[in-house]
Image (cartoon, rainbow, N blue to C red):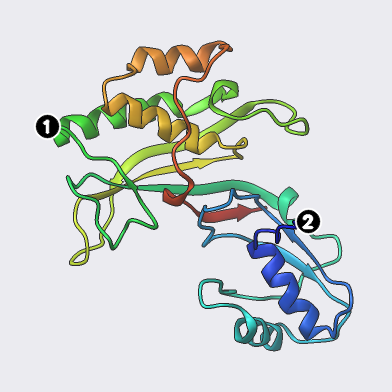
Amino acid sequence: TSHEEKATIEGTILNCLKKIAKHQTCTIAAASRTDGGVHAQGQIAKISLPLDISAERLLLGLNSLLPADIRIIDCTLATKDYQPNKASIRKEYHYYFSTSPIDSVVTTDIALHLPMNTDEQGDLELLRSACALFVGRHDFYNFSSPQSNAGTTIRQIFYCDIHKANFLPLADNVYYLKIIGDGFLKYMIRYLMGALHELVRGQVTLGDIARYLQEHQQDKLSSKAKPKGLHLIRIEET
């Protein structure tokens, strides 16, 4: 039996582009690859299509064809030389998590359920101490999955901290990991969040995290966190 390919955002947009271009060849080149289940509000992509159409009309046309959970926020003309993945110099991601004893139906699709101990403020300070370890230029080999085309596993993290999210009055006790870097390896942020999860549970220590940043290990410090809490927020270009 044959199985239908799982729908992707790129594939869905391409199908809509082909309708606009009357089934001529169209291409999409994105600035960042995201895992299935990850949200990408800040994604930037270059669309190439064999059609003379204004940016405004293309924006309206695409959004009229796309499903309700995919939207193009802005559209502008690009040069032929523009390559989104090479123009990117900083990427900002948020990983949302809820500390409520019972997972909220409001945030269950966009945030990880991470119930805290009775000393929630102490747990949050522990997470912030771990975030400080990630800042700087480090080898994140132990916090990623191997990629044949990744080259170096060294990345620069400019900022990493825990913030309170405002979902009131719909949901309380929602926080997020805010991380900004020059680029991220495959599953890197999800492995970092997985380590923070295990830190709160008392399964790993700050010393363990520091050690895994210093030298290659044979095993992972933790499993990777679920994709649903991860959101690509912003891409800064040259």
Quick one: label 2, few (<14), some, or many (20+) residues within 10 Å?
some
Identified at 61% across, 87% down, the residue is 64
Between 102 and 159, the one lying in front of the other is: 102
Task: Give the structural element (helix, strand or loop) at label 1.
Answer: loop
Which residue type does callout 1 highlight?
Answer: Asp
- Residue 218, labelled with which disc? none
Q: Nearer the viewer, mark 2 or mark 1?
A: 1
Identified at 54% across, 15% down, the residue is 219
Task: Give the structural element (helix, strand or loop) at label 2.
Answer: loop
Which residue type does callout 2 highlight?
Answer: Gln
- Residue reaching furthest front? 1
Place of residue 55 in the rendered image (x, y in percent of width and height, measured from the top left): 71, 82
Identified at 36% across, 12% down, the residue is 207
Upstream in sequence: badge 2 or badge 1:
2
- Residue 119, labelled with which disc? 1
Quick one: label 1, few (<14), some, or many (20+) residues within 10 Å?
few
Identified at 45% across, 43% down, the residue is 226
**Residue 79 image-quadrant placement:** bottom right
Place of residue 181 in the rendered image (x, y in percent of width and height, measured from the top left): 54, 39
Q: Would residue 195 appear left or right of 60 to someone viewing this image?
A: left
Place of residue 113 in the rendered image (x, y in percent of width and height, measured from the top left): 30, 45
**Residue 77 image-quadrant placement:** bottom right
- Residue 83, labelled with which disc? 2
Q: Is residue 87 above or below residue 14?
A: above
Q: Would residue 207 appear left or right of 44 to someone viewing this image?
A: left
Q: Would residue 214 appear left or right of 34 to someone viewing this image?
A: left
Between 191 and 133, the one lying in front of the other is: 191
